[in-house]
Image (tube, coloured by chain):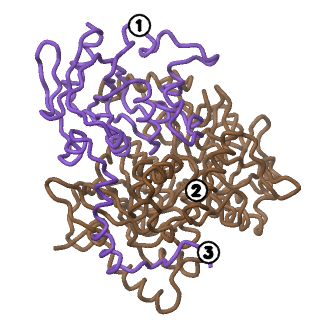
């Protein structure tokens, strides 16, 4: 029977099949952990006297609560927040006690967990990958089954390398058509969520297919898979192809020599078979897309950059009208209002959605020789120490600094308001991150989600700006 | 985990759709290494004003909502992050169950792993519960896990789905990690027949 990419990976990881009474026992190939969602799981292991079953399939980094302030003269990144410092120390202690490799703050491979997995070549096609973080869906760009889990499940994987899982449904997200100038992967995923809603993928795994997806680079594919969870899907996947293999080849943990050839031969068997059936299919015509921006307080409240905020009567039901009203009160915006020309205070270029080297190159290509507008604070936060090093080797840091932007250390930064990087109350930010929830970037912060191109165009003009005039 | 069979209690309705986990518990409360202090951060930005004073208009602060143990909320409750701090905070505050037209997948998993019952009802039942709270906030609702029913004071009843394994675990207090640990032989056999492509995550 023809099978989908999801079916093949699911079937290959069954330790015990699902029955009418019990979920499947699913084997996990790679478990990524960080400081925020793991401490209570280690406590549970200690309470039961358990070991980590496969520390050799587990990798830790520090990213969420870490500062991104520049290093001191001693080369150390100072952690001022005592609670964050204690959490980081706890991770260090847990990794030492249980034998888990850790890339600690400031070390050469430290970075956002979803940036470093692919960068190290640990993220590979056909794998099952989990992490106590909803944006684990990012790794699906490689043709892996990757999803976020809670802390109880982190303990399950630490102790058994397995999870109890009921088989999810599959949804094909088919994207065809050629992208216009200034329209990026970020705009594709924002458009899908705006069109189909933040709950559309609930209970499903997305597989992105179509000619537009095939033409994207790996980093663009990661941006799309990253925000699958914003469409309600725990996982988003893209079939591996030569683009995937070229990206992985030569990375520190990539197979070498004969093992590489065997790996590629296996990976080529993974794409969805002709005639395989998805539970549902949705589509998007990428040729019609414009750069996207959000106006509300969930990622589904998005529109073309030159659009107007919807009127309540254009919405399908009372609950949606009520949600719009609540969102616009929080954002201090009005129905029918355009966002182009709306004054902004902060631009954040970073997060597991858009902090990779290609994002920084794209942003720098427009910012070069220009200035960030007066009164706008622009933070540029590379996704990892490796991205930072590469950007500095290419002189991108100088372009950002010369333009008046801050060049910072690697981490989650202003994406989630749990470290020192925040958007002040009532202020507006154009952000390349993934969530515009109330208070997400700091109490009272108002977020417009957009692509790195739109973020830079807006930084230059000091208002929400259309990036197409710059490309 | 304590077995759960019947939950009877007052409801409080928060009829907002897509309530995300950043609203349930803001990220700045996630710097703990245990489960303490999370109830304090529950719906923080809605419960308190910018000066940290309780917002009298928010439903959880209203006198009639005190002591409620069942939260009724709009569709797609718990969307967003995977933070298990969200169900921990709800439980810490005193909630035993959440009723919604549907839940975000990760939140539902996390809640059920902790014995916070997620009860998925249809739109009609949801609206009925919201109205019930508005009309009589002292009304008690009964959730019967074994029968998979929600019963209102006037006897009106609706059913809710739950997968059989989760139901079994909740009813009998079965420890899911213990269940997985019992699969040791099958896990070892799987590992023996599926060598890892990445031999170790440690840097050589």
Q: Are marks 1 and 3 on the same chain?
A: yes
- Element marked by disc 1: helix
Chain ID for brown? A
Work out whether B108 lies above or below B64: below
Residue B109 image offset from top left, x and y in percent: 33, 45
Chain ID for purple? B
Q: Are marks 2 and 1 on the same chain?
A: no
B40 to the left or right of A423: left
The residue nearer to you, when weighing A102 against A444, is A102
The residue nearer to you, when weighing A77 against A247, is A77
Q: CA distance from mark 2 to mark 3?
A: 18 Å
Query: For residue A321, which quarter of the picture?
Result: top left
Q: CA distance from mark 2 to mark 1?
A: 44 Å
A132 to the left or right of A322: right
The residue nearer to you, when weighing B92 against A325, is B92
A313 to the left or right of A458: left
Work out whether A212 lies above or below B135: below
In the picture, the quarter occupied by the N terminus of chain A is bottom left
Q: Residue at x 23, y 73 (%)?
A: A274
Work out whether B50 lies above or below A415: above
Residue at the spot of label 2: A94
Chain where mark 1 sits = B
Residue at the spot of label 3: B203
């Amino acid at each position: 029977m023809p099978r989908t990419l999801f079916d093949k990976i699911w079937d290959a990881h069954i330790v015990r099949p699902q029955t009418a009474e019990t979920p499947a026992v699913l084997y996990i190939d790679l478990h990524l952990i960080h400081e925020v969602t793991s401490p209570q799981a280690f406590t549970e292991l200690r309470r039961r006297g358990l070991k980590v079953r496969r520390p050799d399939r587990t990798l830790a980094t520090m990213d969420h609560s870490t500062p991104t302030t520049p290093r001191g003269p001693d080369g150390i990144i100072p952690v001022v927040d005592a609670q964050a410092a204690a959490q980081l120390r706890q991770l260090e202690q847990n990794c030492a006690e249980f034998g888990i490799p850790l890339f600690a703050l400031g070390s050469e491979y430290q970075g956002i967990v979803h940036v470093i997995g692919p960068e190290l070549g640990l993220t590979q096609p056909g794998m099952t990958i989990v992490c106590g973080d909803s944006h684990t869906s990012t790794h699906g760009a490689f043709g892996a089954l990757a999803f976020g889990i809670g802390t109880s499940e982190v303990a399950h994987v630490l102790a058994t390398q397995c999870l109890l899982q009921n088989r999810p449904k599959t949804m094909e997200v088919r994207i065809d058509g050629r992208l216009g100038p200034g329209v990026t992967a970020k705009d594709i995923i924002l458009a899908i969520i705006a069109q189909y809603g933040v709950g559309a993928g609930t209970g499903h795994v997305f597989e992105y297919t179509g000619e537009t997806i095939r033409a994207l680079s790996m980093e663009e594919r990661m941006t799309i898979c990253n925000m699958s969870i914003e469409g309600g899907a725990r996982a988003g996947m893209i079939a591996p192809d030569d683009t995937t293999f070229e990206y992985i080849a030569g990375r520190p943990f990539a197979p070498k020599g004969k093992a590489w050839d065997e790996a590629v031969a296996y990976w080529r068997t993974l794409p969805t078979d002709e005639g395989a059936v998805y539970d549902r299919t949705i589509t998007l015509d990428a040729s019609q897309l414009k750069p996207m921006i959000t106006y509300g307080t969930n990622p589904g409240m998005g529109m073309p950059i030159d659009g107007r905020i919807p009127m309540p009567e254009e919405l399908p039901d009372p609950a949606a009208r009520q949600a719009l009203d609540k969102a616009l009160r929080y954002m201090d915006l009005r129905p029918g209002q355009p966002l182009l020309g709306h004054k902004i205070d902060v631009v954040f270029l970073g997060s597991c959605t858009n902090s990779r080297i290609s994002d920084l190159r794209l942003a720098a290509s427009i910012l070069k020789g220009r200035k960030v507008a007066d009164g706008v604070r622009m933070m540029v936060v590379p996704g990892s120490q490796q991205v930072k090093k590469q950007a500095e080797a290419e002189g991108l840091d100088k372009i950002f600094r010369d333009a008046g932007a801050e060049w910072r250390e690697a981490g989650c930064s202003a994406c989630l308001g749990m470290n020192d990087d925040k958007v002040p109350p009532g202020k507006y930010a154009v952000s390349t991150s993934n969530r515009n929830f109330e208070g997400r970037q700091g109490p009272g912060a108002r977020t417009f989600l957009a692509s790195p191109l739109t973020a830079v165009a807006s930084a230059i003009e000091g208002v929400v700006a259309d990036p197409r005039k710059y490309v | 985990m304590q077995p759960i069979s019947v939950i009877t209690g007052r409801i409080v309705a928060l009829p907002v759709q897509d309530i995300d986990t950043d609203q349930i518990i803001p990220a700045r409360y996630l710097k703990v290494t245990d489960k303490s202090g999370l109830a304090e951060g529950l719906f923080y930005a809605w419960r308190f004003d910018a000066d940290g004073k309780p917002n009298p208009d928010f439903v959880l602060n209203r006198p009639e909502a005190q002591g409620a143990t069942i939260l009724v909320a709009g569709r797609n409750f718990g969307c967003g992050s995977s933070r298990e701090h969200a169900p921990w905070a709800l439980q810490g505050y005193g909630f035993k169950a959440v009723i919604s037209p549907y839940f975000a997948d990760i939140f539902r998993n996390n809640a059920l792993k902790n014995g916070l019952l997620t009860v998925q009802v249809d739109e009609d039942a949801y609206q009925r519960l919201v109205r019930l709270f508005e009309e009589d906030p002292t009304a008690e609702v009964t959730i019967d896990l074994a029968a998979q029913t929600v019963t209102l004071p006037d006897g009106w009843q609706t059913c809710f789905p739950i997968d059989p394994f989760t139901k079994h675990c909740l009813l009998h207090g079965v420890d899911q990690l213990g269940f997985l640990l019992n699969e040791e032989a099958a896990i070892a056999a799987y590992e023996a027949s599926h060598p890892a492509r990445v031999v170790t995550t440690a840097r050589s």
